[in-house]
Amino acid sequence: MKHIVKFLSLAFGFAFFFASCDKVADLPYYANGNAPVISSSSNEIAPTPADSLNDVVTFSWTSPNYATDSSTVKYIVQIDSAGRNFSNAASRTVSGTLSTTFTAKELNDILVGFGFNFGVAYNVDVRVVSSYANNNEQYISNTLTIQAKPYVVPPKVEPPSSGTLFLVGNATAGGWNNPVPPLTQQFTKLDALTYQGTFYIAGGGQYLMLPVNGDWSHKYSVADNTISGLAAGGDFGYDLSQNFPGPAASGLYTIYVDFQHGKFTVTPVKTYALLYVPGDYQGWNPGTAPSLASPNSDGSFEGYVNIPSGGSYEFKLTSQADWNGTNYGDGGGGTLSTSGGNLTVPGGGYYKINANTGGNTWSATATTWSLIGDFSGWGADADMAYDAGSQTWTGTITAASDGGFKFRANHDWGLNYGDDGNDGTLNEGGANLPITAGTHTITLDLHNPGYYYYKIN
């Protein structure tokens, strides 16, 4: 029996050996392709708005000679500003064809997207990348450089023909008063279609943009100011029905206005922490009370509060525009306490109030304001009068020649304001304010906490 098993095993072995030696046909061999060569129907392209729907350039390329069906070959046409090595390229993908054509609008959108200026010729690089449909075996063509000039697209919103743009509203330092102070509420014109400015914005207010200072006949506004998120930017238009909604928090904001696309953006630069000053003088209502500001949000607050004569002259400081936050009263000896009685001042007046919630200290200084400068030989003050309606101080001076002046409190140099940047905003102890010869009415506005400004008329 052993011999039979051996024999059968040997027979199966030989059968397997001869079967495994049968020759299999050679696998097919596919040669590699090669890089395509791209060319252009035009090397200088300068369409006009009237050409928007017309074909203006065709890019063609040679076949990469892949071994498979050419109808499945993938081509990516890349366009970028010359010299960027296609790091920010615009792309178009086509399949099975050796050319693609761009209309004037399609090419213009690409050029404008690169930030190119209208009417200026720029060098543009073009290339094509070929591959199989699954992106295997990619080949990159030569780089073709052409010259293209973007044309002006009619803007979505007509820009101001005046070439100027101003901010007005109760969200601004000057309120709804029109004309507005140009130094603090005029935009900078960046180009024919874009304007930008950095402004003080009072939280929760609204505003408009005016093409002509002092003129209410036309305005830039929004269609619906209840749209969520619109305070940070969105669509706007010409003579629409509603005001722009301002941000919720007071502070400095940069507003960018793009007439080409009908868009605006509002970017915070610095938001202010606030303390509200409700008291007997205004009905103990934090929601309508004036406030103190901490521009650096460091616990150091300052602001001016007008407390009319009469009543108890008592008040408190609140961290919210209601009674639900931290409420500060008198801790005695110029200190703050969250459990103390009401803070008091000795009588009616226009008070500069300082508070530090880190050190729990406070002070109140009654002030009256005057002007002093070259117009009086820096001797006699010209007193200013307070108007409770506009919450501003005004005074009139006559200067025999060009010179400088300052604002000071209580006829004393202990508290005075100048303008270090000549930007219309005031700095404590700042540089002299320039004034020309003649008679001028000067306005001092201290009612926006942390942001004080002036006007010269």
Image (tube, rainbow, N blue to C red):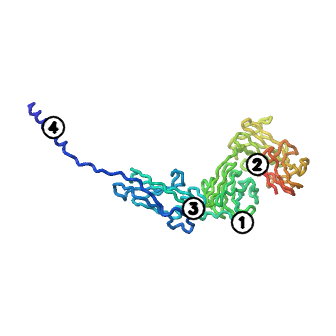
- Which residue corresponds to the image point at 11% horizontal and 33% vertical from the top-left? 6
Kindly indicate whether the residue at mark 1 contacts the one at mark 2 (C-beta within 8 angstroms): no
In the figure, 92 relative to 27: above or below? below
Q: Which of labels 1 and 4 is toward the front? A: 4
Query: What SS does tag 3 mark?
Result: loop
Locate residue 232, reporting x and y percent. Answer: 63, 53
User: How far is disc 3 from disc 2 in space, using C-alphas?
Assistant: 40 Å
Q: Which residue is mark 3?
A: 149
Mark 4 Cα-neighbour bin, 10 Å: few <14, some 14–19, many ≥20: few
Amino acid marked by disc 4: Gly
Which is nearer the eye, 440 or 282?
Answer: 440
User: How far is disc 1 from disc 4 in space, using C-alphas?
Assistant: 105 Å
Amino acid marked by disc 3: Lys
Q: Which of labels 2 and 1 is toward the front? A: 2
Quadrant showing the C terminus: bottom right
Kindly indicate whether the residue at mark 2 contacts the one at mark 3 (C-beta within 8 angstroms): no
Mark 3 Cα-neighbour bin, 10 Å: few <14, some 14–19, many ≥20: many
Q: Which residue is mark 1?
A: 217
Q: Which residue is mark 4?
A: 13
Locate residue 288, reporting x and y percent. Answer: 73, 50
Quadrant showing the N terminus: top left
Which is nearer the eye, 178 or 288?
Answer: 178
Kindly indicate whether the residue at mark 4 contacts the one at mark 1 (C-beta within 8 angstroms): no
Kindly indicate whether the residue at mark 2 contacts the one at mark 4 (C-beta within 8 angstroms): no
Q: Earlier in the sequence, mark 4 or mark 2?
A: 4
Amino acid marked by disc 1: Ser
Q: Earlier in the sequence, mark 2 or mark 1?
A: 1
Locate residue 322, reporting x and y percent. Answer: 70, 46
Left or right of residue 39: residue 293: right
Q: Which residue is mark 2?
A: 421
